[in-house]
Image (cartoon, rainbow, N blue to C red):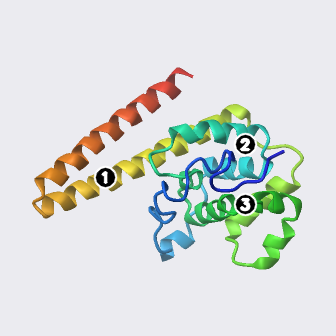
């Protein structure tokens, strides 16, 4: 079972302090009409199930923290915005995850929970066994961390273009160095998981 989760404690879900983290909405955007019809990818469904189940999955999430881009939190590995926001809220507020596991109906009655997220949570809470293996879960976790690195890299590319537009060669060089570092990290990350 999990201990209380709070920023600044030893929780596996909160290794970065609020000051070190990039804004929780760094990759968020307003929901558009297309987002309303977007489905939660299977890998993200597995990760949500892992958050709900805890135990060995908690340990895997904890180990994965070191692989996140600088300033990113565990919730940022979800690309599906409602899931990212729900997990972010759940992990940021001390004791909220334990409260959810003990009395999930409180969250259902609160309203505002995305229907797809709710469906995954319900299936996980009511199911006796999971529909995926540990290997599948590890693969989903590494895939989503890699996708987070790709989004992080894209953000740096945007910053390079903005620096170029401002004709700020110093800032542009700084961002280019950062971009190369991120590309190197992504290559290391890919090689590490290709070996497993």
Marks 1 and 3: which is nearer the front?
3
Q: Residue at x 56, y 70 (%)?
A: 37
Check disc 3 and report the residue beneath it: 94
State how far apart marks 3 and 2 are (Cα).
Answer: 16 Å
Q: Nearer the viewer, residue 37 or 142?
A: 142
User: Up-down: is 43 above or below 63?
Assistant: below
Residue 169 badge: none
Q: Residue at x 60, y 41 (%)?
A: 141
- Left or right of residue 56: residue 140: left
Task: First in sequence, mark 1 or 3: give its number.
Answer: 3
Check disc 2 and report the residue beneath it: 58
Element on which disc 2 rests: helix
Q: Nearer the viewer, residue 90 or 10?
A: 10
Q: Residue at x 66, y 48 (%)?
A: 47
Q: In this figure, what is the number of numbered marks? A: 3
**Classed neighbour count for the residue bearing mark 2: other residues with Cα under 10 Å, few (<14), some (14–19), many (≥20):** some
- Left or right of residue 148: residue 84: right
Q: Quadrant of the N terminus?
A: top right
Question: Mark 1 touching mark 3, by CB under 8 A?
Answer: no
């Amino acid at each position: 079972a999990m201990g209380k989760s709070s920023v600044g404690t030893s929780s596996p879900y909160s290794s970065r302090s609020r000051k070190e983290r990039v804004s929780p909405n760094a990759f968020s955007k307003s929901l558009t009409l297309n987002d309303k019809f977007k489905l939660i990818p299977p890998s993200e469904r597995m990760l949500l199930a892992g958050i709900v189940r805890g135990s060995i999955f908690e340990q895997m999430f904890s180990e994965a923290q070191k692989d996140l881009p600088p300033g990113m939190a565990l919730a940022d590995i979800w690309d599906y915005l409602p899931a990212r926001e729900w997990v972010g809220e759940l992990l940021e507020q001390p004791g909220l995850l334990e409260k959810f596991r003990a009395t999930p109906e409180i969250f259902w009655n609160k309203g505002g929970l995305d229907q797809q997220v709710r469906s995954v949570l319900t299936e996980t809470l009511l199911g006796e066994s999971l529909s995926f293996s540990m290997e599948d879960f590890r693969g989903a976790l590494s895939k989503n961390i890699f996708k987070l690195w790709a989004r992080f890299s894209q953000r740096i590319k945007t910053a390079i273009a903005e620096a170029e537009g401002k004709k700020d060669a110093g800032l542009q060089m700084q961002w280019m160095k950062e971009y190369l570092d991120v590309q190197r990290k992504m290559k290391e990350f890919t090689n590490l998981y290709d070996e497993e």
